[in-house]
Structure formats: structure tokens, C-alpha cells
């Protein structure tokens, strides 16, 4: 068990550190996306008639369009987006001030992957289906390391109350035990639910054998949910009809869905068969205590105002397996309980990352003191590679994350490929951190690699608000004055990370580098 815990934890821990750190950041993917888009804030208008403004503009600009869509502002100071599909199939969109009805210049905000990048890297490493499989394999390895760790450390809960600072290997062991005990229930839950969410990706063959190929998943979900068949698409009647009062329907939709409408779609405007749909998707800050917090929608007959369909206001009939999977998914994504639960997940994710980081560092600290000679003559070089991977897994991932934010502000705003190059900046920085760690470890000392990357990360985190002010004119004070707590929290968290990484760098700088001692061999008796 000890051997299994050591090597499974080491080899899986490197990539898992990156997976856990990006997963932790993705808990707040909505605030991260909001900060990275850097949309100018509009004057807040009380009792804004946004839907009336949108309806009047679309009726004048696109009276013969096949469909209209309005994305309403989610927060005070946000703009709204109007889109329509012409008869020839072309799509058009504009950004509008909901208070004045004025059309705003485009692009409105920066094109970016935002917080979605952290989420995508977390569950597939931006690697498509092979990435899914690799993350699943590593997650299984983490479960093995967790179980074997509990078995190996018989006094793990007792040792939790023991911390011996400044004792080298013992201090790292105490830190590993403490972070493991604090986050153990969370870690088991988050890894198990993560595997459960993507069970179709890991085991697609039974479903494909039953339902066929391309549309197997949709057919499977339809039967599993036991929902009524979707409404047939609205077809043009050729008879003209007055446009519906979209503002009045919005009020009805909000009442029926028990949640403010976030978007509206009108199919066949001005036709007798016109149909209006309102959606109210739960936001990341939704404080609902309901674990199964389904998206809600209502569909009206545009000519008569009759309700054609209402979903999400109560649990639909479904098999127990459907509810079980949805519960697992919501537990993993933290789409319940509001910001308090998200902060708990954030702290739990950081504790899990620290647990894996201290475990991989403990491996090297122990072998600096006494080499186990596991790889014979190549042991010293293998240890150096392990040291370099440790640096890249923790400090390198953090450095890549903050460089991702810098790329968002430094890449040209009008560049079509900027969103892709933000992600590439993250990946290239991660690779560069590994190369830097290897060079430093083999030519000088892993201690210098740690110092270089930790101090660089700390300085970049600290300077992020200054970069934001220099490139966009937005800053922490303005966010606070305008009530934009999400963007303010991003910069405050960056400064908190700066302090944390500076403390880590100071600790590394004050650490005395130990000289590896070769494991003593058993004396050979004289003959």
C-alpha cells in the first residue's frame, strides 16, 4: 500500500495539481469571464423598459425576419444583445443600451474564452476525447491514492492535530496530513462525482449498442427523462398578425417561471403562427437551496398569448437514474447554494491542490535526505526530473493561469484570433515553465527554479490590477463604486494569491538545501 500510494500519487499528482487548480478557478468562471470581457458599464436606469426598446428596434429594422432574439441584461449597467435571422439565412446582431435604446459600437467587450477555458482544461485538458480519457484515468488514480493514503497513514486523524514547523521532512508530512484530513470528504465527493458526470464518455458502447450511433445520446436522454415530446417547429401560415406585446409577455413569463427572464426568442414575427419563448437559466450566483435546479422556459402562442409549454418549475417525471445523475452533476458543478457554497468549493479545491503539492514535494524532500536508489545509476537524474515536474505542476500552472489573464489584456482587442491565443499563451507558458525547471534543476538547483517561478507569479498577480487600469481604464475603485462585485473580487483574489506566492517564495528562500545521502548498503560478511 505504501508503494502504491507513493508512486500513484506522484505520477498522477503532477497533472492532477493542474486539473485541480484550474477546476478551483472554474468555480468562479462567470466572474472571470465578466472581468476578461471588460465590457464598459452603462448608466444604471431604474425601471428600464428594455424589452419595449428591443421590440421597437427589431420591428423597424427586421420586420420580415424569420426570428428575433433578445438577450436581456443580467445585471445593472449591462448592455443587451439583439439578433435576428433574415429570410436568406443570414444572421445579424447589435448591442443596445437598455436605458436609451441607442445602438452601441461593436465589438462590445473583448472576445475571450474567459472562465470557460479553466473549465475545459479541467475536464479534458483541451485534448478532445483523449483528454476526457486521460482525466478519467488520472481521477481513478487519485481515488486509489486517497484510499491507499488512508490505509497507510494509520494515525492520519491523530496526526492532524500535530504540526512541527521548521522540521524539514516532518513539517511537509504534517502539512500533507493536515490538508488531506481537512479536504478528504470534499476530495472523495468531487472526484467521484466528476467521474459520474462523464460516464457516457468513459463507457459509450452500451448506449451506442442500444440506440445506435450519432444521435444515441439524445435518444437516451429523451427516454430517460420521460418528458413529453418537444413542440413541433412553427411553420409560416402566410396570414399576417399583429406583433405580440413582448413586454407584457415578459411579465407573465417571469411570474410563471418564478425567475426573471434572461432571453426571448420570437419565431415568425408578424405571422399568425408566431411563437414566443422565454428562458430563465440559473446563474452561478443563484442562492437556491434546491440541488436539482433546472433551467426554466415558457412558450407562448404569439397570436393568442396562450401558454403552449412550461418547463422547469417543478420536477418532471423521470427515472431515478436521471435524478441521480443530475444530483451528481450539480454537486460537482456547485450550481446550488449561491456564492457561499462556491467559496466553500474554492477553499476545498485549494486544500486539495495543496494536499497533492505537499505530497509530491515530500517525495523529493525525503529522498534528498536519503536516496532510495530505486533506479540504480540513473536515480539522481530521475530525482532531478521529479523535482522539475514538481515545479512545473504547481508554480508553473499558477504562472500559466496568471499569464492567461495578461494575454487577455495585452493581445489586440480587434484581433479575430485573440481568444484562441489566450489559451495558447496559457499552454505555452506551462510548457516553458517545465523547460525552465528542467534547465534550472540540472544546471543549478531546483530551489532556484522554485524561486524564479514563485516570485514571477507573485509579481504578476500583484500587478494585474495595474495592467487592467492601464489597458482598459477600469480599476478596483471603479468596480466598487459601480457595484460590480464580481470583477472587484477577481482583482482582490489576484492580490491575495500574490501574497500567498510571495510567502511561498520566502519560505523556499529560507530553506537550507539538503545534500542527498545515499542509502546505506548492508555490509558484506568477510569470507
Image: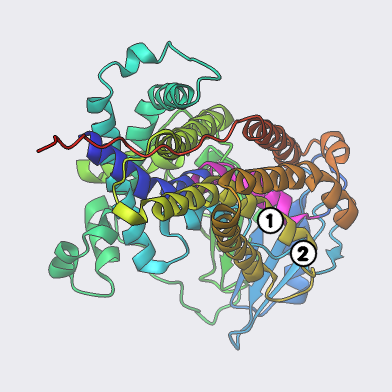
Pair 2/1: label in front: 1
Its colouring scheme is rainbow
What secondary structure is marked by label 1?
helix
Q: Could you tell whether 242 is left or right of 412 in the image? A: left
Q: Quadrant of residue 183?
A: top left
Q: Is residue 395 above or below residue 87?
A: above
Check the image and name the residue furthest to the left: 527
C-beta proximity under 8 Å, tags 2 and 1: no
Q: Quadrant of residue 63?
A: bottom right
**Residue found at the very far bottom of the displayed protein:** 88
In-image side of 147 versus 273 (left or right): left
Find residue 382 and name its label: none
For label 2, the SS is strand
Q: Give the number of the disc on residue 95.
A: 2
Number of numbered tags placed on the structure image = 2
Of label 2 and label 1, which has the lower sequence position?
2
Disc 2 crowd rating (10 Å Cα; few below 14, some 14-19, many 20+) is many
Q: Relative to 145, does residue 414 appear above or below in the rendering?
A: below
Query: What span is colored magenta in the figure?
Result: 22-39
* Numbered circle sitting on residue 403: 1
Amino acid at each position: 500500500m505504501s508503494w502504491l500510494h507513493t508512486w500513484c500519487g506522484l505520477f498522477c499528482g503532477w497533472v492532477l495539481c493542474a486539473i485541480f487548480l484550474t477546476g478551483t478557478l472554474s468555480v468562479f468562471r462567470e466572474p472571470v469571464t465578466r472581468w476578461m470581457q471588460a465590457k464598459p458599464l452603462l448608466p444604471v436606469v431604474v425601471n428600464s423598459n428594455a424589452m419595449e426598446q428591443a421590440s421597437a428596434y427589431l420591428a423597424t429594422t427586421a420586420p420580415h425576419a424569420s426570428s428575433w432574439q433578445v438577450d436581456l441584461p443580467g445585471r445593472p449597467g449591462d448592455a443587451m444583445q439583439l439578433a435576428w435571422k433574415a429570410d436568406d439565412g443570414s444572421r445579424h446582431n447589435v448591442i443596445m443600451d437598455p436605458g436609451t435604446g441607442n445602438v452601441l459600437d461593436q465589438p462590445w467587450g473583448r472576445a475571450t474564452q474567459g472562465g470557460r477555458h479553466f473549465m475545459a482544461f479541467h475536464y479534458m485538458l483541451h485534448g478532445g476525447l483523449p483528454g476526457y480519457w486521460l482525466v478519467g484515468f488520472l481521477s481513478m488514480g487519485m481515488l486509489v491514492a486517497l484510499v491507499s493514503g488512508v490505509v497507510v497513514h494509520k494515525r492520519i486523524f491523530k496526526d492532524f492535530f500535530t504540526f512541527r514547523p521548521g522540521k524539514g521532512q516532518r513539517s511537509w508530512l504534517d502539512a500533507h496530513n493536515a490538508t488531506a484530513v481537512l479536504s478528504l470528504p470534499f476530495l472523495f465527493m468531487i472526484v467521484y462525482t466528476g467521474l459520474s458526470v462523464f460516464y457516457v464518455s468513459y463507457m459509450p458502447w452500451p448506449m451506442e449498442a442500444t440506440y445506435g450511433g450519432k444521435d444515441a445520446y439524445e435518444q437516451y436522454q429523451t427516454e430517460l427523462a420521460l418528458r413529453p415530446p418537444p413542440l413541433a417547429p412553427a411553420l409560416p401560415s402566410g396570414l399576417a398578425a399583429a406583433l405580440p406585446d413582448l413586454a407584457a409577455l415578459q411579465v407573465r413569463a417571469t411570474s410563471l417561471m418564478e425567475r426573471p427572464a434572461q432571453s426571448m426568442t420570437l419565431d415568425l414575427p408578424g405571422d399568425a403562427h408566431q411563437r414566443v419563448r422565454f428562458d430563465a437559466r440559473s446563474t452561478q450566483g443563484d442562492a437556491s437551496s434546491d440541488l436539482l435546479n433546472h433551467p426554466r422556459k415558457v412558450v407562448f402562442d404569439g397570436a393568442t398569448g396562450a401558454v403552449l409549454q412550461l418547463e422547469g418549475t417543478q420536477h418532471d417525471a423521470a427515472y431515478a437514474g436521471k435524478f441521480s445523475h443530475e444530483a451528481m452533476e450539480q454537486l460537482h458543478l456547485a450550481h446550488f447554494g449561491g456564492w457561499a457554497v462556491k467559496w466553500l468549493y474554492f477553499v476545498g479545491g485549494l486544500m486539495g491542490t495543496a494536499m497533492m503539492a505537499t505530497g509530491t514535494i515530500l517525495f523529493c524532500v525525503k529522498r534528498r535526505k536519503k536516496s532510495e536508489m530505486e533506479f540504480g545509476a540513473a536515480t539522481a537524474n530521475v530525482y532531478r526530473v521529479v523535482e522539475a515536474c514538481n515545479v512545473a505542476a504547481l508554480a508553473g500552472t499558477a504562472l500559466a493561469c496568471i499569464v492567461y489573464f495578461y494575454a487577455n489584456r495585452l493581445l489586440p482587442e480587434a484581433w479575430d484570433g485573440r481568444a484562441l491565443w489566450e489559451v495558447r499563451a496559457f499552454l505555452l507558458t506551462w510548457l516553458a515553465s517545465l523547460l525552465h525547471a528542467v534547465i534550472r534543476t540540472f544546471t543549478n538547483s531546483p530551489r532556484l527554479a522554485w524561486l524564479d517561478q514563485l516570485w514571477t507569479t507573485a509579481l504578476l498577480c500583484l500587478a494585474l490590477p495595474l495592467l487592467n487600469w492601464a489597458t482598459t481604464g477600469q480599476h478596483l475603485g471603479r468596480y466598487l463604486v459601480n457595484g460590480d462585485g464580481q470583477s472587484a473580487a477577481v482583482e482582490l483574489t489576484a492580490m491575495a494569491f500574490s501574497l500567498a506566492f510571495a510567502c511561498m517564495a520566502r519560505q523556499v528562500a529560507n530553506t537550507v538545501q539538503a545534500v542527498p545521502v545515499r542509502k546505506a548498503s548492508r555490509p558484506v560478511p568477510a569470507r
